[in-house]
Image (cartoon, rainbow, N blue to C red):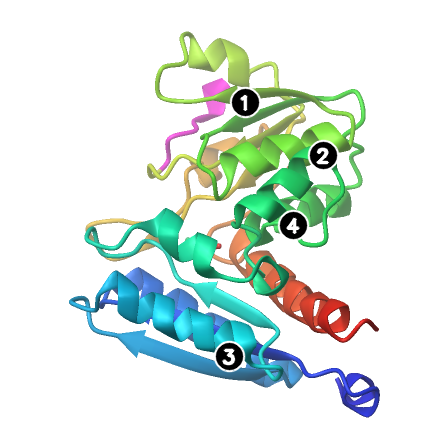
Amino acid sequence: MAKLKEEGVKVGLAVIIVGDDPASRVYVNNKKKACEEIGIYSEEYALPSEATEQEVIDIINTLNERDDISGILVQLPLPKHINETNIINAISYKKDVDAFHPVNVGKIMTGDFDFLPCTPAGVMELIKESGVSVEGKECVVIGRSNIVGKPQAMLLLHQNGTVTICHSKTKNLKEVTKRADILVAAVGRPKFVTADMVKEGAVVIDVGINRTEEGKLVGDVDFENVKDTAYAITPVPGGVGPMTIAMLMKNTVKAARLLANK
Ligand code: GUN
């Protein structure tokens, strides 16, 4: 960070949070903490749930113009009366460290990208760490959200995986997931993936963060039972979550470099 400062590269992250969703509050706090730990300047804009779409857009417009802010992140989900697409589109694509802006989504599709969305990028790092190459492998993603499922499939495809996306209308889900050498679960349902859905020796990445009635954090995968079937598996908490934040830090620094042409 000191070297960047010397080079005149200003790294700063602005985080906007609207309303009082407890999970969003935890995620935003973790992002701010990571910034502090590595020396990235950060600012938080915490708006009440009644804030209007225009109020959020006004803040974004100001941040777009500031040269000390390289990344702008609006924590999702937003309250129902605020249109998520309008908010994402208002962020300068050059400061879009989530890579949710249509310009960045398009760049991911063609492979000519500056930023990768943080969670799918973190998943790719975890797969790499397992030592298993994606090339030629059967990759199954459960979930088709714009934040995880769709970009995840594209990143696996870029690394020459044979990719299937499953969703709530998929027939014979178990038959499909059982084919997977690499299985990514992004469903949002606790312990959705059971041992009988997993191929022996698969790499299993759990993107889910669900809170049980007792307040315990659990993933989408039944970890205790699947761990014996899988070759490698990520825990929740402590698996994908910290990687998402690491990728956000990487994107914020990269945005600063690109903005400074360095
Ligand atoms: N809500 C859940 N995941 C994310 C994320 O990666 N970025 C933002 N902005 N909101 C989220």
Quarter of the rendering occupied by the C terminus: bottom right
Label located before the other in sequence (4 or 3): 3
Residue in the picture at 25% in, 57% down: 215
Find residue 241 and report its horizontal and vertical position in percent.
51, 57
Q: Residue furthest left?
A: 50
Tag 4 residue: 116
Tag of residue 33: 3
Q: Identify the element where label 2 is drawn.
A: helix
Find residue 11 and report its horizontal and vertical position in percent.
66, 80
Label located before the other in sequence (2 or 4): 2
Q: In this view of the protein, which residue sits in the foreground, 191 or 47?
A: 47
> What amino acid is labelled 2 in the image?
Thr
> What amino acid is labelled 3 in the image?
Lys
Tag 2 residue: 110
Residue in the picture at 28% in, 71% down: 55
**Gap between marks 1 and 4 measured at Cα:** 28 Å
Label located before the other in sequence (3 or 1): 3
Tag of residue 59: none
Q: Do the residues labelled 3 and 1 touch (CB within 8 Å)?
A: no
Tag 1 residue: 198
Where on the picture, by quarter, is residue 82?
A: bottom left
Q: Does any atom of ligand 1 lie closer than 8 Å to the CB of label 4?
A: no
Q: Identify the element where label 3 is drawn.
A: helix
